[in-house]
Amino acid sequence: MLRSIILSPDRELASYLHRVLADTGEVTIARILDHYPDAVELSRVLRSHAPQLVFVTLDSPAHVTRVAAHIEQVMPGVQTVAVSRSVDPQVLMEVMRAGIREFLNSPVDRNLLDDALIRLKENLSRKPIAHQSSELLYSFLPAKPGCGATTLAINSSLALTRHDNTSGLLMDFDLNSGMIRFMLKLNSSYSILDAAQYASTMDEQLWPQIVTRCEKLDVVHAGSLNPDIRVEHMQIQHLLDYARRNYKVVCADLSGNLEKYSMEIMHESRWIFLVCTPEVASLHLAREKLQYLQRMDMGDRVRVLLNRFSKKTSILPSEVEQVVGAPVMMTFPNDYTRVAQAITNGTSVDSGSEIGRACDELASRMVERKSSAQAETRRKFVEYFNISPARFSFDRGKS
């Protein structure tokens, strides 16, 4: 089925065209606009629906040429079809100069429509649509419950939206005990389950009702505790596709239980932030999860974040690296006071604090800005584990 939208101030013609296209069994209409949208609205509609075809009626040739030019600029490859009640050679010449090569005259001849659809499919095959879709999708995976993955996900996501022209989305996929709604004091009745349910038909009108704005960050919480409900593969795919078309950076807070839908999200992620603490149990589970992800061919995406790290302890990142089997990308200080205060206020941690600066540095790396690297010396904490230290890297194969 060819996903399409109709732009037509002529409502009667738009309704007729909808019926004709539906009767072909080859075209689905995702949206009908009863006006010519301006550049901002048209961009939003294109990102929301990702159409392959745009049918636009020739009520105003000047508007149609501007629409066609903007479609080619925002989403090259989308096929634009002009529709009119009459044939005016001069108007046809104008729209052809705008790049529109298909024209339908009302009433539509079915044979001519079928021929046009064949040509449109061939054009789409020769020139695939260039969707503007972000590759900056990140997953936050806790080594064990309570290690602070959600805290880092929230504060890093909030920090990244403070960068210029960076739109961010944070989604809570922990359906067992999602804490984002509580930590940010969100009151929306819509949850990630609603977003998944309507993902295939999501549009620019429904989406603002589902997300909640926190500072400059859009957030979708996990809703009430409901461990029996899961989301399906295609729901996840549609939801991620929609999010990546509409945001520069998308973050997913996962439960750590490695559900099927969580695995799907991690498969789509640029990096998987494996969050652990210096505790023995946390490091053990971090190593187990890394090895599992390596078996699933995702080991090269894992970036270890060491939370609640203190330089006064005898455990250093270099030793954690040997235990877990992957480099520590960043460390985050143990600051219960500021984290508790942020939760009480439903805000981010103080951006000027040590943990706030660390979250901002992680955000800089997520939006691909340069940041300083941390270096640590090595001690002998690995003796807590009965393992033989081995070389490791992000390119490490299966264990």
Image (cartoon, grey):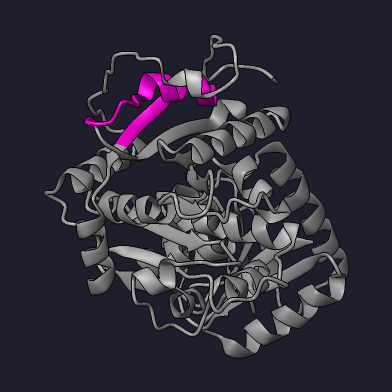
User: Magenta includes 101?
Assistant: no
Task: Give the image quarter of residue 334.
Answer: top left
Residue located farthest toward the left when viewing the structure as drawn: 352
Q: Is residue 235 above or below residue 248?
A: below
Q: Is residue 301 above or below residue 111?
A: above
For the image, the number of numbered tags is: 0
Residue sitting at the far bottom: 12
Q: Nearer the viewer, residue 210 or 147?
A: 147
Image-based side of 107 in relation to 245, left or right: right
Q: Decide which of 380, 370 is in the foreground and name it.
A: 380
User: Is 106 positioned to the left or the right of 163 in the image?
Assistant: right
Residue 227's x, y, as percent? 67, 71
Image coordinates of residue 174 in percent, x first then y, are 56, 62
Q: Nearer the viewer, residue 304 or 69?
A: 304
Does residue 364 sit above or below 223 in this rendering?
above
Q: Is residue 328 magenta?
A: yes
Locate residue 381, reporting x and y percent. Answer: 42, 21
The image quadrant where one finds the N terminus is bottom right
Query: Residue 229: horizontal and vertical position, in percent?
Result: 71, 72
Answer yes or no: is residue 82 visible. yes
Residue under the image location 67 percent in, 73 percent down = 197
Q: Is residue 197 above or below residue 118?
A: below
Q: Is residue 270 visible?
A: no
Name the quadrant containing residue 184.
Answer: bottom left
Q: Residue at x 64, y 74 (%)?
A: 198
- Quarter of the image for the C terminus: give it: top right
**In the figure, is residue 337 to the left or right of 392?**
left
155 or 276, nearer to the observer: 276
Q: Which residues are magenta?
A: 311-331
Kindly identify the residue that appears in the image at 41 percent across and 27 percent down: 328
